[in-house]
Amino acid sequence: AQSVTQPDIHITVSEGASLELRCNYSYGATPYLFWYVQSPGQGLQLLLKYFSGDTLVQGIKGFEAEFKRSQSSFNLRKPSVHWSDAAEYFCAVGSNTNAGKSTFGDGTTLTVKP
Amino acid sequence: NAGVTQTPKFQVLKTGQSMTLQCAQDMNHNSMYWYRQDPGMGLRLIYYSASEGTTDKGEVPNGYNVSRLNKREFSLRLESAAPSQTSVYFCASSEAHRGGEQYFGPGTRLTVT
């Protein structure tokens, strides 16, 4: 069965500092991996995705993530955080079978200090 | 394109009342999903539908029913609401062949008193 772990429930960074949010997954084959962002009071929006190929993927809003098969990780990074990045971030592992169901992590809440 | 739309945005029910949450997508996706989101518990899948006319239970289906009315619409019904169903409900859609990349609606905030 597939699973996703986001070890950090809450992270606080200063505006302009770099950010790394951790994600570990468990999946039998090559995974489909996603990061979503949820701003307060809104639905989830796709930030970036990994299907295959280059292990460093670029997303919207200046985010990137690196797939490391040996560590079963898909960590999200941003070199310089903006106050508007404060949100909840979800990592997910998907599938192209079984109706495309995804398994989501419990989320990491990012607070940005001025 | 509107993407995924949900109605209503907010709802307050008394215990025992019933209601239907509506969801529609205009992306021609085959798969649709209903999730609930509670503080500290992430997203939990209630029901999903792989195609028009099919539905399947997710992690937390008790107390809910669904209808995949057509390819666009997927509704969630609470027959007899309970305080434990106070939550934020999200509908999503995807194409399975794209690895389950999901598009979410804005959510319905439901309070059961």
Image (tube, coloured by chain):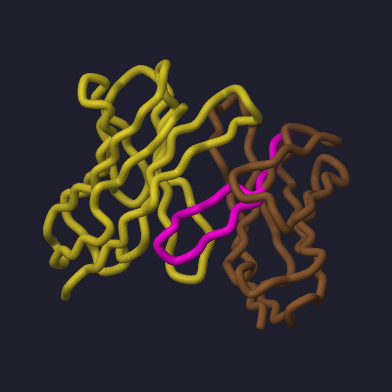
Chain colours: A yellow, B brown
Location of the C terminus of chain B by quadrant is bottom right
Q: Nearer the viewer, residue B99 or B89?
A: B89
Magenta region, main secondary structure? strand
Q: Is residue A2 visible?
A: yes
Compared with A100, B10 (above or below) is below
Q: Position of residue B69 (x, y in %)?
A: 87, 46
Residue at (63, 75) in percent of width and height: B83
Magenta stretch: give its range.
Answer: B30-46
Q: Position of residue B111 (x, y in %)?
A: 63, 78
Residue A40, located in which quarter of the rendered image? bottom left
Residue A56, located in which quarter of the rendered image? top left
Compared with B64, A84 (above or below) is below
Q: Is residue B2 visible?
A: no
Q: Position of residue B68 (x, y in %)?
A: 83, 44
Q: Nearer the viewer, residue B37 or A82?
A: B37
Residue A28, located in which quarter of the rendered image? top left
Q: Position of residue B18 (x, y in %)?
A: 82, 71
Q: Nearer the viewer, residue A90 or A8?
A: A8
Relative placement, left or right, of A89 versus A43 is left
Residue at (64, 67) in percent of width and height: B85
Compared with A4, B46 (above or below) is below
Residue at (70, 78) in percent of width and height: B11
Q: Is residue B104 magenta?
A: no
Residue at (30, 21) in percent of width and height: A54
